[in-house]
């Protein structure tokens, strides 16, 4: 294997590791900052968006794709990319096949990691507000909220009070 092909393989591997690294730090999509204060105390008598959690149910979030879909699609994309990069840099047929195999493995690992992080669970939190209204918010984490917890509903999520 020539030094140019080794360098190309190293760059392709670094790119796959970088993509997989991006997939391992998911964002819940919600700010972890506490709900803003509206002044005064947050007692039940003057908080129009506060109430008690009556029910929590876990729901699936993300797609309902089969568990191997990310790895399969990532492997296909990686194999094609590895083969094309090798063929455009003057690699022999053998080098193109090696690059395709390396791309398939890297793509499968990255695709699997991405799919795992997009298919996490979410929770529907049912809240009976102080004025008798009811509302449901869907959020990825509960942060200590349980049935019976007193919460404030703000920005599409429930915050423990």
Image (tube, rainbow, N blue to C red):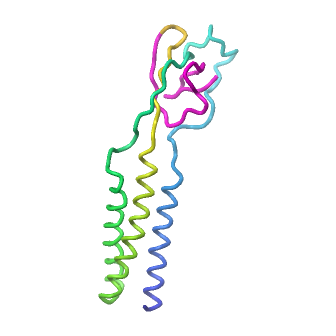
The x and y percentages for residue 23 are 48, 56
Say which residue appears at 45% left-offset and 28% top-offset: 57
Farthest right residue?
40
The x and y percentages for residue 83 are 32, 78
Say which residue appears at 32% left-offset and 51% top-offset: 66
Above/below status of 72 relative to 130: below
Say which residue appears at 60% left-offset and 13% top-offset: 47
Q: Residue 31: which quarter of the image?
A: top right
The x and y percentages for residue 24 are 52, 55
Q: Residue 152: which quarter of the image?
A: top right
The x and y percentages for residue 14 are 50, 72
Number of marks present in the image shown = 0
Say which residue appears at 47% left-offset and 76% top-offset: 11
Considering the image in quadrants, where does the C terminus appear? Answer: top right
Above/below status of 12 relative to 48: below
The stretch of residues the image draws in magenta is 133-161
């Amino acid at each position: 294997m020539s030094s140019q092909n080794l360098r190309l393989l190293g760059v392709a591997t670094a790119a796959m590791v970088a993509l997989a690294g991006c997939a391992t730090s998911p964002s819940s999509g919600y700010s972890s900052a506490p709900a803003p204060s509206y002044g005064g105390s947050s007692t039940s008598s003057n908080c129009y968006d506060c109430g008690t959690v009556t029910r929590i149910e876990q729901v699936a979030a993300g797609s309902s794709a089969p568990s191997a879909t990310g790895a399969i699609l990532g492997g296909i994309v990686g194999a094609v990319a590895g083969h094309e990069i090798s063929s455009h840099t003057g690699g022999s047929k053998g080098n193109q096949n090696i690059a395709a195999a390396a791309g398939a493995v890297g793509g499968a690992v990255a695709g699997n990691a991405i799919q795992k992080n997009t298919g996490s669970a979410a929770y529907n939190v049912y809240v009976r507000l102080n004025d008798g209204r009811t509302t449901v918010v869907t959020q990825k984490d509960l942060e200590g909220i349980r049935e019976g917890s007193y919460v404030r509903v703000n920005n599409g999520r429930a915050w423990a009070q």
